[in-house]
Image (cartoon, helix red, strand yellow):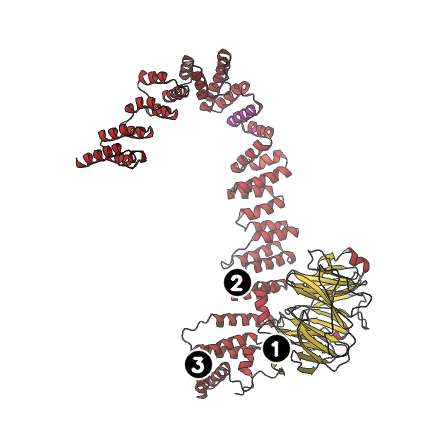
Amino acid sequence: MPIMYNTGEWFKVRPDYYRKVELATPDWPLDLDLEYMWVEVAPYGGPLAVTRDPTKLVPVKGTARPMIRIFDTTGREMGHILWNHGKLIAMGWSDMEELICIQENATVFVYDMFGREKESYSIGDEASVTKIVEGKVFQSSAGTGVAVMTTSGRVFLKQNSSKTERKLPDIPNSSINCSCWEIVSEGRNSYCLLGRDREVIKLFPGETVGTITANLFEKPHERIIKISMSYNHQHLALYTNTGLLWLGSVDMRQKYCEFDTGRKDMPLQMEWIMNSDNSEADAVVISYPSYLLIVNRNADRSDFPYDPVMFLVAEMDGVRIITQSSHEIIQRLPKCVENIFAVNSQEPASYLFEAQKKFEEKSYKSDEYLSMCREKIDLAVSECIEAASYEFCPETQKSLLRTAYFGKGFIRNHNPDEYMRIMRILRVLNTLRHERIAMPITFKQFSHLNTEVILSRLVFRKHYAIAIQVAKHLNLPESWILEHWAYHKVMNDPNDTEVARKITEKFKNPSVEGISFCNIASKAHQAGRDDLAIKLLELESRASLHVPLLLKMRKFDRAVGSATQSGDTELITQVLLEMKMHMMLSNLHMTIRDHPLALNIYKKIMRESNRAGLYGIYNTEDDQKAIAEYHFQNAIETEGLESNLSMIGNAYAQGRCTLEAELCADTSRLIKLQKTLSTKYNVSVNGLSIHETIQELLLIGELKEAGRIRSDFKVPDRRFWWLRILTLSSQHKWEELDKLAKSKKSPIGYDPFVEVCLKQDNVMEARKYIPRCRDNRRVIWYMRANLFNEAVDSAFEQRDVHSLFELQKNQAIVNNGTLLSKVCDCIAMLEGK
């Protein structure tokens, strides 16, 4: 059915439709004439770099010094660069909207969009010596790269500023000059294609010499003068001096078509038109002075008269055309748009669109159109939503979204998420396309860049309010945008109090999360505004963030106070170490003495690094206990404990540490006693504990001496008995052990006697002591001694059915029929009772 709506700028290059969409008209300064200019345009609606074209005679206006001026797409000047370097060979834009300038000596300069220099680097010594004749800026998965051709015909390639340059292979028969060249990226690899006479040369890294491909054209020609690569680096276009155009794959194995343009003049530019709804390219745009030609794979054409000077910008879904008086984009018409608006379209989306229009007119025909698409109304609604995303005109977007809204009312359980998502994105896109923002990107470009990149570009252009509104609209965090706004305030507003007040007001909003005042304070400190930095740091509640900056600013008193309040020992240690490096010790002590936690940690640090300084602190504070510990540690390390014990004990006594003082006295007595024993019995007991000293005496049979030491040092009976039992068993003195057991009631019971006997594998000795053990332990000891018959009798006597059941499971008893029968009988008797 015929629907003449929004189709005025459509044109057909069989079999596909294309369209020209007019973007915001640029308003260039009066002194800028693009006819005499060299223009490089950033993709994704980015800025333009403009400078005088050195190949043209330009009427000089103003300064004669070379200048690069940077504009947005509406003609508003954003910045400029006074070029005071060598001869400029090439310019281009990075994927971060940075202007890359290549000069003759192979030095590359990088500027932001406001003309501020960011960095510079060289492409290599060999390239700088032989000089540059041409340069290219290209994109790859590794980032933005630079390629240059030297006067000697060598090509050098640098994938990005951080990678080393690579020299591509030699050009075969390099005495013949190349007429054109282009860089191709495949994944992380990039190579060069050169046009020379009637052949194409491929220079791939790692090869020794380039490979030649010839006889691509069927018709006669003299040389290839232009090479163009598609945006996705999958398709290749070649143009000859006789006006022949060759289209094919980038590897030149597949030829799409060969077309005679019929023109003998040199084309200005040649770019592929990428499709909007997929990643293919079906046509190229060729610009001539005052003329534009479009040719597709099927060798069909369409042409337009144009301004004398135009600049083509390859995009991922079309080609932008910038002239002195216009700014347009050429796209292959998305299929969903064609289905709705094409003349005589029979698609469901077209009927739904017409039904909605008739519904608004309150016409009965609305139901007739609706009946034609009711079976495929899901598809119709989806196409209307998709078509709205491709449109630039807000009125057309509204019409399509109204149609989708109308149609989804006839779909049961329709999910509106996609409808809401597209509507939100379109509001953002319309804002970005406004001449005040001047970022005319398409829906496909928006989806490719993602919202974080879009917001970053808005922030860099200082459109803070718009960026915050976009973030809110898309339910994204806005805190980092506010941080950038705060940076801008810090760098440009001289009133500290006013800046702190404005930042506080903005950041106190409860919806703003993740704000770090420290980052802003750091910027203030870098700008030499320490008073403002301190005011901002007072707003930061996280000590781990603001204390490092206070240290950097040498505000040590504030830093130690904040760190102590946080209770973070690692942070306090960091502060103390920094203070120790930059302060006199007397000043440091005065600063930290009011902060007990910091003082204690400082003492620990000094204890590990500078003990002499630590002693001075203890004396100043009259801390006798700490002085005693200090002397004790020194005595241990210098092996002079005996001579220092009295001094240590006195210090403990003065510090009212009675227990420690008594221990010092006992230790002194023990050391003297050990010296006497070593001399008297010819045994080494020096440095042993009381326990070990008694054990050594028992081993050599000095029971009386051991008993005397036990009394003097108040060793408990239980410990002394254990020592005797262990000593006698280790020496296999079983009779002595038996006498000890019978001498008096054991303070530790008789389980230790059984245990040491079994440890020495003496079951017969163990059998003596088991009957004297507690009732609940006898069965266990009999089982450990493998005396199963006695274990059964003991369990039966104690009426311990549980132990009998455990015995019944024992493998040794299971294998012994007599014992097993006895156990079963005992169990039966006990259960019977």
Cα gap from disc 1 to disc 2, whole angstroms: 33 Å
Q: Which mark is residue 332?
A: 1
Using the rendered image of the protein, determine whether residue 164 is visible from the camera's viewpoint: yes
Percent position of residue 246, x then y: 70, 76
Of the two numbered discs 3 and 2 in the rendering, the one whose residue sits closer to the viewer: 3
The quadrant in which residue 430 appears is bottom right
Q: Secondary structure at mark 3?
A: helix
Q: Which mark is residue 375?
A: 3
Q: Which mark is residue 476?
A: 2
Using the rendered image of the protein, determine whether residue 395 is visible from the camera's viewpoint: no
Cα gap from disc 3 to disc 1, whole angstroms: 29 Å
Q: Is residue 626 magenta?
A: yes
Percent position of residue 569, x then y: 53, 40
Residue type at mark 2: give it: Leu
Residue in the foreground of this view, choosing between 86 and 526: 86
Of the two numbered discs 1 and 2 in the rendering, the one whose residue sits closer to the viewer: 1
Residue in the foreground of this view, choosing between 622 and 448: 448
- First in sequence, mark 1 or 2: give its number: 1
Image: magenta residue range: 620-637
Residue type at mark 1: give it: Arg
Q: Is residue 260 magenta?
A: no
Q: Quadrant of the C terminus?
A: top left
Q: Secondary structure at mark 2?
A: loop
Q: Residue at x 62, y 83 (%)?
A: 12
Q: Residue furthest left?
A: 833
| Label 3 neighbour load within 10 Å: few <14, some 14-19, many 20+ | few
Q: Main secondary structure of the magenta part?
A: helix
- First in sequence, mark 3 or 2: give its number: 3
Percent position of residue 474, x then y: 52, 66
Q: Is residue 361 left or right of residue 617?
A: left
Q: Secondary structure at mark 1?
A: strand
Residue type at mark 3: give it: Glu
